[in-house]
Structure formats: C-alpha cells, structure tokens
Amino acid sequence: MEYQLKIDCSDGGAVKVFSSSSPFMPVRVGDLIDAATWGQPDSGSKFLVLKVEHSISEKPKLGIDPSGRIVHRVLIHTERVPATAQMSA
C-alpha cells in the first residue's frame, strides 16, 4: 500500500505533498500544521485544518511495484494562519 498526504491552502492550491510506505498520523479539523521545516516559501507558516478527505484507489498494473497497487490519499484543506498561532487546549 502507498500513502499520500496532500495539503492544500484556501489561498492558492497545493502547499505540499508527502508520500510514504506507512500510514501518516491522523489529522483532524482544527489541527495546526507547522511548515517551518519544509524549506520552501511556505516555511514559517502555519496552516489550520478545515476539512479532511480520504480516497482509496487502485493503481494501474504496470509491472512490479513494491509499494503495492492500493493508494490511500488524504487531502487536507487548510487556511494560512499567523506563524505565532497556537493550538487551543
């Protein structure tokens, strides 16, 4: 199985896409995602999770694929918040 995590921002498309051979930690509405270590223009930004969507699909059969044929995609819709924002208790 292959796992993909795609983070989109309400102010303009994809922010970051991650792929892994093991599942990601659960993400919930209201979570803050800190982009400080991403090393790209969004570094230092934080993103508030507004919506989480899951998609499970099969990849087309194209030879041997060590990750398997199933892909679990998680699409996270966010909005940018000040870098000083903190998650509420």
Image: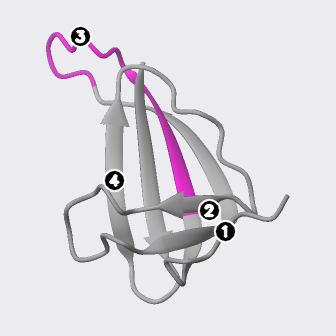
Residue interval drawn in magenta = 61-76
Marks 2/4: CA distance? Answer: 16 Å
The residue labelled by disc 2 is 32
x 85%, y 58%: residue: 89
N-term mark: 1 or 3: 3
Foreground: disc 2 or disc 4: 2
Provide the secondary structure element on which disc 4 rests. Answer: strand
| Mark pair 1, 3: CA separation | 39 Å
Mark 4 Cα within 10 Å, few/some/many (few <14, many 20+)? Answer: few
- Asked if the residues shown at circle 3 and circle 4 are in contact, with their CB atoms under 8 angstroms apart, the answer is no
Q: Can you tell which of label 1 and label 3 is closer to the viewer?
A: 1
Cα–Cα span, label 3 and label 4: 20 Å
Mark 2 vs mark 4: which is more N-terminal? 4
> Can you tell which of label 1 and label 2 is closer to the viewer?
1
Task: Residue under label 3, please give it.
Answer: 66
Mark 1 lies on residue: 86
